[in-house]
Amino acid sequence: MADNERIMNIPLKVTKSVPRTKRAEKAVAEVRDYVAKHMKTKPEDIWMDQKVNEALWSRGMQKPPSKVRVKAVKFEDGLVEISLPEE
């Protein structure tokens, strides 16, 4: 079913350089861009699980985490699914 599966540590230090009220939104965009670059797809073809979104917004819009660990699975049709790794 799944072609490619990777666990990635995504640095989100770039989010500290944007205004405080846009940091969590920038973190979501950074996760999409990072995964798109490393899985060789477009950011539009990425589906993000709700738990990843909640992890990025867990401390509010002004204090997103400095890094996040995600599992990315690329399917045959090019769609990439991002979720939190089960530990």
Image: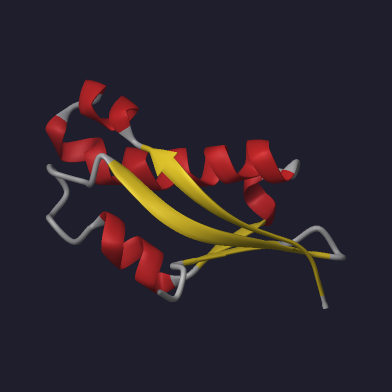
Along the horizontal axis of the image, is 15 left or right of 34? left
Along the horizontal axis of the image, is 62 left or right of 53? left
- Residue 81 x, y percent position in the rendering: 62, 65
Count of numbered circles on the image:
0
Vertical comparison of 47 with 65: above or below? below
Question: Considering the image in quadrants, where does the C terminus appear?
Answer: bottom left
Residue at figure coordinates x 36%, y 50% from the top left: 68
Quarter of the image holding residue 21?
top left
Question: Considering the image in quadrants, where does the N terminus appear?
Answer: bottom right
Please name whichever residue, 7 or 13, is drawn nearer the observer in this view of the structure.
Answer: 7
- Residue pushed farthest top? 17
Along the horizontal axis of the image, is 36 left or right of 25? right
- Residue 77 x, y percent position in the rendering: 86, 64
Along the horizontal axis of the image, is 67 left or right of 50? left
Vertical comparison of 49 with 5: above or below? below
Residue at figure coordinates x 52%, y 49% from the top left: 8
- Residue 50 x, y percent position in the rendering: 40, 72
Residue at figure coordinates x 64%, y 43% from the top left: 36
- Residue pushed farthest front? 87
Vertical comparison of 81 with 44: above or below? below
Vertical comparison of 23 with 51: above or below? above
Please name whichever residue, 19 or 1, is drawn nearer the observer in this view of the structure.
Answer: 1
Residue at figure coordinates x 29%, y 55% from the top left: 56
Quarter of the image holding residue 6?
bottom right
- Residue pushed farthest right? 76
